[in-house]
Structures are given as C-alpha cells and as structure tokens.
C-alpha cells in the first residue's frame, strides 16, 4: 500500500462508496428487512460526520498548532510550512518520541494528548470519545440488526447449509427452514439456524468474514474451545466445524446459549454485584487451566506469541510494519513505551480470552450464562484479561470488589504495574488492527463488511487515544 498521506476528504469518499454500495445492494432491494436499520444507521452517521466536519473547519488549524507544540516539546525543529498537513511530519515525530523514551525520559504526555485529541476531533467532526463510551452507545442500540456486507458469495445461506449437512451424511433428517443473522463483529458473522423437526431445533453458526484484520479464523477457535471442556467455563460447545472451501467461509455450529448480551441493561440491574462476582470467578477458572501445547493455536494474533513480554511487543510491531500503513507518530511512541517498560518475564502464563468484556458476556436472570467470541484467545499473563475488562467493570462495581472476588476464586492478586502494562499492550493491539481496517478501505477494497470499514474509521483514532491516555495515567490500584 502507498504511504502517501490521504486527504480527509479521500477517507470520507472511501467510506461513502461502501455506504452507497450497501444502500443500493441491501437497503433498497430488501426494504423492509432486518438489515435496513443497521446499514441505514451507518449511512446516517457518515452523512452527519460530513456535516459536522464542514461546520468545524478550524479543527485542522487546531491540530496543526497542537502538533507544532509536540515537536517543540521534543526538541524537534520543523520547517515553517511542514505542518500544513500533519501527516507529513508523523515519521520525524515518531522517531523523536522513540529516542525520547529510550533515553529514559517521560514523554510530555499532556502536550502529546492534546495533539492526539485535536487529531481525533478533526477526524470525527468535533467529537472525541473513549472506547468505553462508544461501546456503551452501541450497547444501548443493541436491539438493532447487525447485518453484514452485501455481495459476499461465501456467506452462509439456507441452501448452502442444507447442502453441507447432506454431504456430511448428517443423522438429522430435519430440513433447515430459516437462517437468521443475529450478530456481526469484526472477525465473524453469527447466524441462528432453525430446523423443521418437532422440537424446532436451533443451532448457532459462527462464520468467518471475507476479511479479518488479524487473519483469524474459527478453525483456530474450535480446538481452543475443546480444551475448556470440564473447566466449568460457560463457553460455546462446538458441535462440528466446517473448514473453508470454495463455496463458503469456515464456520462451526453450537447449541444456543441462553441469555442476553445487552450489558447496558444487566450491568445496571439489581443483580450487578452478583454478576460481577460471577464474571470474576469464571475468569479465575480460565486462568487456572494448565497451559497446553501451543501447536493447537494459529500464529496470527499480534502480540500473542513470544517467550517474554518484550518478544510480544516485537511480534505486534512486526504486524504493524507489515501493514505498510502511513506513519503514525503516536503509534511509534506507544510501541517505544511498551518496549522500554516491558516486564522481564512471565510470573505465570495461562490461557487468556483476549477480549474479555461485557459485549461478549451473556446473562440471564442475574446469572452469567455465556462467554463468547474466543478468536483472540491465547496464552499470556492473567493481567491481560483483568485490565482489559477494567473500564467496563468499573461501570458496574468497584475494582477492589472485582479483584477480591477474582482472588477468592483462585486468581492471582492484582499487581497495578503489571496490569497497567498489559492493559496498554492490549489496547494498542486493537488500535493497530483498526488502523489496518482503515488502510484496507483506503486501498480501494470494496467487498468488505461495512461494519468492519466503519470500525476502522470510527475506532482507529479512539483506540490509539485511549492507549496514550492509559500510558499517561500510569498504574492504578
């Protein structure tokens, strides 16, 4: 991919191309349909983004001024006209930040954050939110359909599923009567299949998308789930896996898990403290499972492989460098901080979920019933999961209550410095993944799910800003 800095208008044009494609390919032919609400919602947001951006032209000047302040704070002399486009100075700023951190000095974080916030406001039309705020907003609208991309020829259909079942020689004589999409994330699409037997049997099918920012697949997820058998972890029980072939993306089937993923509702319910303790117990049980052979897991997730924490940073850095994205000084600074402050080794290496957060937790009648979406699962430090869930958990109970419940269930005692470092690395992983999504749509690819494209544009800057905010805030008890 080219490192030429795209103009803001070019980014919007790329997103609008995808939005218009789905308007023509999904909404208009299918109205009324379950996909219309979600696709229409994204189109409205994009149009509103353009309107907000046009109404705030001074945001570019604010970002330029803030970038010059960072350069001065780092002792970097810039040409007088160098920051008319701040993308042009990302490489020298990143190199200066890395040298600063490697010298043992703290970056001037207030100045750096001001520039990052100015950049995010400019990109988001005057709005600069945190990741948890964005998730809360998304959760509140969880009842809307989450339909995926139009035109993906390898998405499951009733006919394709029936052909696969027939070819498997399935003992199930019932026929597939419906296949409804019930979820769509960054890595896979989730369907509910219903059969015409007397029990109206239902299966949940989790299928790869035609694009994954981390190259992940359910084919890696299934053997990991098999290792959880007998551990009292409410994870999906894979019934069978269909590997990718010339007709469909890989998918696996599991029985439905009861409950709701509407965390805005259950995290504020009268059962909140009890649910928080249950989540802590499930996390402790996961971290108590002995490590098994890593050959059963694919090598794809950035930052999930290496003998030391510093090796994990190098693994993630290799992923970032391979993207060929335009330079981002703040990403370089965050990588340098992770390298400089990496723990010497692992006190304990355990199975971790990798995306242990409210949007992947099912609850029914005040009881945690499911922990979903295991595509980020790998072996690592227990603090990876602990600090990942922290910003969500603190909306539900006190952090001390959660860590005490985790320790009572057999988990390690929370160490703020370790939790802080692993929390930064986990947030940085999400940031570079979303930047990859952004680079893909800039490169002109038009067949990806509009949700994935929207994540790239909406979350890339937010996640990077949250990473920098975490570093600047330092460890918390």
Image (cartoon, rainbow, N blue to C red):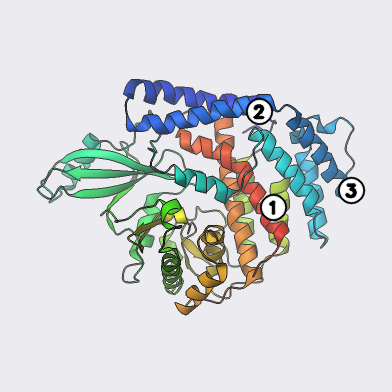
Q: Would residue 131 be seen by someone viewing this image from the given angle?
A: yes
Q: Nearer the viewer, mark 1 or mark 3?
A: 1
Please report the residue visible at 74 percent of the width from the left and 32 percent of the height from the top.
Answer: 59
Query: Which badge, 1 or 2, is on the more N-terminal residue?
Result: 2
**Farthest-out residue, front:** 270
- Give the percent coordinates (x, y) of residue 113: 74, 48
Q: Would residue 349 be seen by someone viewing this image from the given angle?
A: no
> Spatial distance from mark 3 to mark 2, Cα to Cα?
32 Å
Quarter holding the C terminus is bottom right
Please report the residue visible at 89 percent of the width from the left and 48 percent of the height from the top.
Answer: 75
Q: Nearer the viewer, mark 3 or mark 2?
A: 2
Q: Nearer the viewer, residue 113 or 336?
A: 113
Q: Nearer the viewer, mark 1 or mark 2?
A: 2
Q: Nearer the viewer, residue 449 or 400?
A: 400
Q: Residues within 10 Å of mark 3 (few under 14, many from 20)?
A: few
> Spatial distance from mark 1 to mark 3, Cα to Cα?
20 Å
Q: Where 389 falls versus 129 (above or below)?
A: below
Residue that carries the numbered disc 3 in the rendered image: 75
Residue that carries the numbered disc 1 in the rendered image: 468
Q: Secondary structure at mark 1?
A: helix
Residue that carries the numbered disc 2 in the rendered image: 53
Please report the residue visible at 50 percent of the width from the left and 77 percent of the height from the top.
Answer: 407
Q: Residues within 10 Å of mark 2 (few under 14, many from 20)?
A: many
Quarter holding the N terminus is top right
Query: Which badge, 3 or 2, is on the more N-terminal residue?
Result: 2
Q: Where 101 falls versus 402 (above or below)?
A: above
Q: Where 130 falls versus 80 (above or below)?
A: below
- Give the percent coordinates (x, y) of residue 417: 66, 69
In the picture provided, is 183 more to the left or to the right than 405? left
Question: Which image quarter: residue 174?
Answer: top left
The tag on residue 203 is none
């Amino acid at each position: 991919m080219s490192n030429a800095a795209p103009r803001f208008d070019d980014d919007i044009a790329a997103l609008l191309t995808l939005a218009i494609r789905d308007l023509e390919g999904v909404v208009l032919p299918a109205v009324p349909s379950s996909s219309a609400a979600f696709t229409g919602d994204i189109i409205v947001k994009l149009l509103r983004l353009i309107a907000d951006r046009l109404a705030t032209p001074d945001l570019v000047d604010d970002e330029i001024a803030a970038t010059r302040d960072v350069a001065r704070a780092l002792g970097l002399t810039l040409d007088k006209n160098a920051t008319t486009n701040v993308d042009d100075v990302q490489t020298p700023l990143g190199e200066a930040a890395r040298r600063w951190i490697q010298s043992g000095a703290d970056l001037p974080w207030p100045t750096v954050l001001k520039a990052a916030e100015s950049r995010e406001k400019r990109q988001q039309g005057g709005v600069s939110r945190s990741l948890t705020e964005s998730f809360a907003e998304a959760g509140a609208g969880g009842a809307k359909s989450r339909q995926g991309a139009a035109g993906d020829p390898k998405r499951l259909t009733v006919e394709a599923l029936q052909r696969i079942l027939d070819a498997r020689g399935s003992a199930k004589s019932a026929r597939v009567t419906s296949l409804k999409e019930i979820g769509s994330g960054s890595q896979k699409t989730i369907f509910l299949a219903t059969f015409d037997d007397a029990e109206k049997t239902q299966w949940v099918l989790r299928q790869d998308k035609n694009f994954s920012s981390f190259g992940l697949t359910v084919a890696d997820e299934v053997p990991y789930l098999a290792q959880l058998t007998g551990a009292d972890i409410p994870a999906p029980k894979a019934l069978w896996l269909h590997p990718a072939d010339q007709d469909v993306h890989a998918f696996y089937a599991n029985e439905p898990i009861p409950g709701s993923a509407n965390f805005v509702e259950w995290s504020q319910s009268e059962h909140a403290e009890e649910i928080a303790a249950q989540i802590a117990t499930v996390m402790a049980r996961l971290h108590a499972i002995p490590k098994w052979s890593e050959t059963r897991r694919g090598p794809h997730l950035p930052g999930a492989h290496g003998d030391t924490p510093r090796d994990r940073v190098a693994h993630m850095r290799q992923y970032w460098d391979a993207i060929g994205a335009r330079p981002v000084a703040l990403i370089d600074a965050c990588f340098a901080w992770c390298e400089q402050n990496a723990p010497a080794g692992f006190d304990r290496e355990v199975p971790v979920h990798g995306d242990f957060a409210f949007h992947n937790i099912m609850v029914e009648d005040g009881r945690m019933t499911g922990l979903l979406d295991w595509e980020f699962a790998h072996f690592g430090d227990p603090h990876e999961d602990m600090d990942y869930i922290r910003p969500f958990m603190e909306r539900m109970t006190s952090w001390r209550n959660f860590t005490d419940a985790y320790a009572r269930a057999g988990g390690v005692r929370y160490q703020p410095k370790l939790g802080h470092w692993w929390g930064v690395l986990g947030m940085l992983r999400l940031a570079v993944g979303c930047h990859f999504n952004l680079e893909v749509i800039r490169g002109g690819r038009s067949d990806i799910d509009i949700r994935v494209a929207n994540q790239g544009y909406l979350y890339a800057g937010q996640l990077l800003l949250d990473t920098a905010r975490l570093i600047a805030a330092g460890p918390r008890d």
